[in-house]
Amino acid sequence: MNKNFQKDWTVLIYINGNNDIEPEIRQAMLAIKNADINENANVLVQISREEWNLVKIIRPLDNLPESDDKWVGVRRYYIKGRECILIEDLKKINMADPMCLYDFIKWGIKNYSAKNYMLIIGGHGCVLKGALADYSQDNPYMMGIPEINIAIDKACKEVNSKIDILVIDMCYFNLLEIIYEFGKDKDHSVKSILTYIGEGPIQGLPYEKMINLLEENDTEDTIKKIIDNLNYNLVAFQVDNTKFEKIKSLFNELAHCYLDNKKEELKSYELLSYLDVNQPWYSVIKDIKDSMNSIVIYSKKINNNLGLINIMTYLPSDSNQLYSYYKLSFTSDNKWAYLISDKKTIDNINLELKPIKISYQAVCELISIMNPLLSTDDKELILNNLINYKNWKLK
């Protein structure tokens, strides 16, 4: 490309079909290829696809169209108009590896510089535990949420750039604890986040439409335009370390105030939901709601008692769930975490830029999401068929 000409946007699309949503990921790519893409945007796609037999094992009830284009693995493309240029065939690499995401971001920004950057991450998500489930390897893997941020931050700092809009195309990523992770440092690399308020469609967002709605320079106007023109329940947040630290401090204060003054046992969601001016923590909850609203850039729908942002108010006693929760920076020195985890804490959290092996139970949860109408026995049969097909040794 002409190094003297800098486009307004570079869009980095990281979509993982190394799992049972391969048909939807494939369709997303076809939609991009068949669209007249905004000429003032570099569009780079790293896409992975798993074997068709794996999809059929996990989704036995779905009548899914098989592709004539049967390649498997990971590829990088550059989209120019309606031309889809294969840049590199990366073979069967693990898309749940944070270093894989890091490498894609660094490569994309370094080779296709622009005035603004949008990063889209799409694939399977699992609340708190991670994202981008990958079934292509010797074990099933996920990318941890802190690791996603570390990968983005590491890549951006090495090329001296920031992500103007991070699009998280996965369900239930509008948790305060997750949003906080991307702004926990003063010199954070993500400026804003756009995601679903709750559940999103299995086919994901129409990336080609989002790209063609990009404004020349104004990120906030771009975000509003995307949300207004897409028929999805979307919300966008400003990533602001100062505001984030205030919100975290308020939740810590709320938990201390409740524990010091409680006259009855309240669940965490009750504490936030039922306001009484006579409660000593009444003003703290008001401040929390105002502060949480202050980071919302734009949305079309009010979701719950806290507005457009969810927060964990209950954690099961499962040790894996607790460990995943305490990996998040929002829980550090925060009494709120102690309160909602039923006064359990976990120390010695070790963060590495590596993919996380998924447990038997976590894979079962993902199978349940795709097969809500099947019985427990049928879901376990699918999982066991999958384990045998992949020759995994799950615990």
Image (spheres, grey):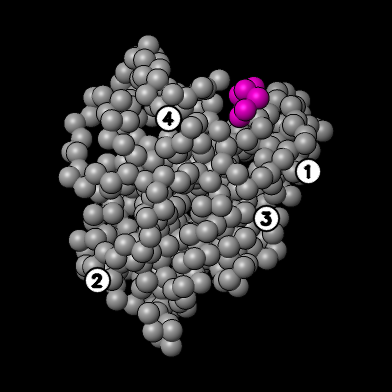
Foreground: 17 or 127? 17
Magenta stretch: helix, strand or loop mostly = loop
Point out the tag, 4 or 2, that comes first from the N-terminus: 2
Give the labeled residue for mark 4. Answer: 366
Look at discs 2 and 1 and give the one toward the viewer: 2
SS under mark 3: loop
Q: Look at the image and say whether residue 81 sits in the magenta stretch.
A: no
Give the labeled residue for mark 3. Answer: 184
**Horizontally, is 183 left or right of 112 in the view?**
right
SS under mark 4: helix
Chain part drawn in magenta: 314-321
Give the labeled residue for mark 2. Answer: 81
Inter-mark Cα distance, 4 to 3: 29 Å
Inter-mark Cα distance, 2 to 1: 50 Å
Residues tagged 2 and 1 counted as in contact (Cβ below 8 A): no
Give the labeled residue for mark 1. Answer: 333
